[in-house]
Amino acid sequence: MAEIENKINSSAKHDEKKRFKRRHFAPKRKVCRLCQEHIEKVDYKQIQILKTFMSNTGKILSRRITGNCARHQRQIARAIKINRNISLLPYSN
């Protein structure tokens, strides 16, 4: 009977170690750069700002990667699409 309890306790300890081992570190929270700089509206004419939110292949980077808030991400996407339409920015590389 004691052997069974030891096996149960050892497996429970092993599970606890696994659970705590997965959370190695807390990721640093990304902050919207545009909110920090107090930029209210992103315009399609601000090409330098828009290029920082695009990949080398011309894709729009996601909020998860850039750390933008939802409002600024929508403004950036809209401005990039306008720029692509008037040929200021490429659709692809």
Image (cartoon, rainbow, N blue to C red):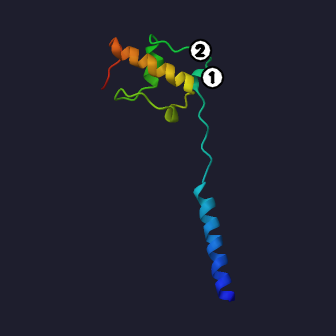
Determine crowd level at label 1: few under 14, some 14-19, many 20+ residues with C-alpha closer than 10 A.
Answer: few
Spot occupied by residue 91 in the image (x, y as percentages of width and height): 32, 22
Give the numbered dot on residue 47. Answer: none
Q: Residue furthest bottom?
A: 1
Q: Residue at x 39, y 18 (%)?
A: 81
Q: Nearer the viewer, mark 1 or mark 2?
A: 2
Marks 1/2: CA distance?
A: 10 Å
Q: Quadrant of residue 19?
A: bottom right
Q: Secondary structure at mark 2?
A: loop
Spot occupied by residue 55 in the image (x, y as percentages of width and height): 40, 29
Question: In the image, is residue 38 above or below residue 63?
Answer: above
Q: Quadrant of residue 50?
A: top left
Spot occupied by residue 31 in the image (x, y as percentages of width and height): 60, 30
Question: In the image, is residue 16 above or below residue 80?
Answer: below
Q: Residue at x 60, y 60 (%)?
A: 21
Q: Is residue 93 left or right of residue 3?
A: left
Give the numbered dot on residue 40. Answer: 2
Q: Residue at x 32, y 13 (%)?
A: 87
Q: Secondary structure at mark 1?
A: helix
Question: In the image, is residue 40 above or below residue 18?
Answer: above
Quadrant assignment for the C terminus? top left
Q: Residue furthest left?
A: 93
Residue to which mark 1 is pinned = 36
Determine crowd level at label 2: few under 14, some 14-19, many 20+ residues with C-alpha closer than 10 A.
Answer: few
